[in-house]
């Protein structure tokens, strides 16, 4: 599949655009106080509460991507009452929370044992990783790490030259 680098896209829409059936599976949802590593991921100094989510998105029978997400409850208190059983966190956030800035970090890595297991691929399989943070004004909203099997995803951006 293809995804634009400078957009926040909906994974379900991406899968459906490929003509494949979409399914979402919430693996875990934990509400807890943020730790130092969480604050680094969110680019936040707050020691407040957050929700940690792990989910898998499917395109037909195959895992399309693994989603590992933190939601800052200071920025999105209404997420505390959302189960995320019926709607993927990314779609819920796009529909519910306005954001003012976003950052994408794109990398590649070989799947470790737990990630490989979640993606239903062999350990060591090349993966594409898209990490994104969003803010509303200066307040961090969410940080997500999306891991895709590397042979089934590509990032595409079309742009024009800037004026000199």
Image: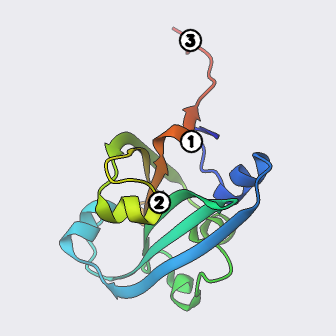
Please indicate, yes or no, whether residue 136 appears anywhere in the rendered image. Answer: no
Front-lying residue, 129 or 46: 129
* Residue that sits furthest to the left in the current view: 36
**Can you identify the residue that label 3 sits on?**
163
Work out whether mark 1 precedes mark 2 in sequence or the reverse, and give the earlier one.
2
Front-lying residue, 154 or 91: 154
Q: CA distance from mark 1 to mark 3?
A: 35 Å
Residue drawn at point x = 27 percent, y = 68 percent: 39
Specify the label residue 152 is tagged with: 1
Please indicate, yes or no, whether residue 155 appears anywhere in the rendered image. Answer: yes
Q: CA distance from mark 1 to mark 2?
A: 12 Å
Specify the label residue 119 is tagged with: 2
Q: Position of residue 46 (x, y in %)?
A: 28, 75
Q: Nearer the viewer, mark 1 or mark 3?
A: 1
Specify the label residue 117 is tagged with: none
1 and 2 marks in contact (CB < 8 Å): no
Work out whether mark 3 precedes mark 2 in sequence or the reverse, and give the earlier one.
2
Q: Is residue 138 left or right of residue 136?
A: left
Q: CA distance from mark 3 to mark 2?
A: 43 Å
Residue drawn at point x = 66 percent, y = 72 percent: 96
């Amino acid at each position: 599949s293809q995804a634009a680098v400078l957009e926040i896209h909906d994974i379900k829409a991406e899968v459906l655009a490929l003509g494949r059936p979409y399914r979402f599976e919430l693996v875990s949802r934990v509400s807890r106080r943020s730790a130092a590593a969480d604050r680094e991921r969110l680019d936040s100094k707050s020691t407040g509460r957050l929700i940690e989510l792990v989910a898998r998105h499917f395109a037909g029978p195959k895992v399309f991507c693994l989603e590992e997400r933190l939601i800052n409850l200071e920025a999105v208190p209404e997420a505390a009452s959302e189960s995320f059983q019926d709607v993927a966190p990314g779609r819920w956030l796009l529909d519910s929370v306005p954001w003012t800035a976003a950052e994408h970090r794109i990398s590649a890595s070989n799947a470790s044992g737990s990630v490989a297991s979640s993606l239903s691929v062999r350990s060591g399989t090349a993966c594409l990783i898209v990490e994104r943070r969003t803010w509303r004004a200066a307040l961090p909203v969410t940080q997500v790490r999306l891991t895709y099997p590397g042979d089934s995803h590509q990032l595409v951006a079309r742009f024009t030259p800037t004026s000199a």
